[in-house]
Image: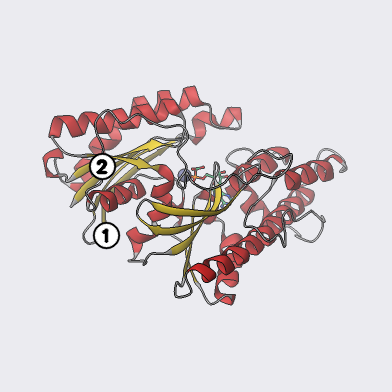
Amino acid sequence: MLVLGIETSCDETAAAVIRGGDRSILSHRLLSQVDDHRPYLGVVPEIAARVHIEHVDRLVEEAMAEAGIRFGDLAGIAATAGPGLIGGLMVGLMTGKAIAAAAGKPLIAVNHLEGHALSPRLMAPVPFPYLLLLVSGGHCQLLIVEGVGTYRRLGTTIDDAVGEAFDKVAKLLGLGYPGGPAIEKVAESGDAKRFALPRPMLGRKDCHFSFSGLKTAVRQAVTALPLPLDLAAVADMAASFQGAVADVMADRLARAIAVFHGLYPEARHVVIAGGVAANRTLRARLTETAEGAGMALLAPPFWLCTDNAAMIAWAGFERLRLGLTDALDFAPRPRWPLDPTAPPAGFAGVKA
Ligand code: KG4
Ligand code: ZN
């Protein structure tokens, strides 16, 4: 079963071909738009949509050529249909629909988050259910992946996503965009104990996250320093911030593992996915937490953690083999939660 995947939900234009049966990735092409958005220190939706239009056809052609196949050889075409920036989603989904219509093949409208959630199964046959920590620029959730299309949300952020916090703190420190990799790099030479930053939500009984207070604490600490910031101060602040995030994530993960154990005593796998899962310090810390609780932590390779089309093709394959295909009039969705039944985080005075 050969599946073409197309991803255009944010600032990466990507196309990939996988063979589901034996988990082979025949090709994966990706154009990062980072340079187009860097001057604005964040993703500009209009620019993103235009860049997707300019490049998606070529990337699909290249992915097909590298895989050495024709559209007629495909079992299905999987395109990200949400959640994400509507302009980009329209470009990728329309491209997928056009190929599906022309080749007479089924379309699979993939939820981008499901792409991240199922991505570890492209590497190894990880059994359901597993606990998923999904941490990216737009999302920060703990979910139980019970099966394809069946997700139970245990926790979410009540304000910023963790990747967003990395990006905002990087901006405060003058480290540019995207912030996560920049903070990780400078933090290597920093002293994580120099600045005493708060650990929001630590010890709470639920599994939610909050990062805006931590970001504000960084801003206040930076304001108290003499300007211009010297290199050591930037490195120490980056390390202190990353250390605080690691403490919070480890605590929240431990809490979620306890809940997961209560529901599924036999399950043994924790998976981290999303761009922030590329962070080595966080991975190491979360591995310790999981192993301490008798669980194995699986993290996809770095390139598969950040946005890509191979995970979309894989999610498409998982749905296709269950007979889950979509009509050609499927509309892109800017919002599309994996667990629509999850209650909002619902704290007094805090947006959910
Ligand atoms: O999954 P992703 O590529 O796109 C979204 O769906 O959001 O995640 C991008 C996010 C950005 O916020 C970026 O700063 C963060 O992941 N990120 C990192 C690292 N690499 C990327 N955060 C911390 N450490 C990293 N090494
Ligand atoms: Zn993503």
Q: Secondary structure at mark 1?
A: loop
Q: Is residue 343 above or below residue 35?
A: below
Q: Is residue 286 above or below residue 118?
A: below
- Name the residue: 83% across, 42% down: 220
Residue 76 figure quarter? top left
Whether pointer 2 and pointer 1 mark residues with C-beta atoms closer than 8 Å, the reply is no
- The colour scheme of the drawn protein is secondary structure
Tell us which disc is closer to us: 2 or 1.
Answer: 1
Q: Earlier in the sequence, mark 2 or mark 1?
A: 1
Residue underneath mark 2: 63
| Residue nearest the observer in this picture, 191 or 200 | 200
Q: How many marks?
A: 2
Q: State left or right for residue 292 relative to residue 106.
A: right
| Residue nearest the observer in this picture, 233 or 310 | 310
Could you tell me the amino acid type at mark 1? Answer: Arg
Residue underneath mark 1: 23
Label 1 crowding class (10 Å Cα cut-off): few <14, some 14-19, many 20+?
A: some
| Residue nearest the observer in this picture, 190 or 45 | 45
Whether ligand 1 has any atom under 8 Å from the Cβ at mark 2 is answered as no
Q: State left or right for residue 9 relative to residue 191.
A: left
Label annotation for residue 312: none
- Name the residue: 42% across, 35% down: 9
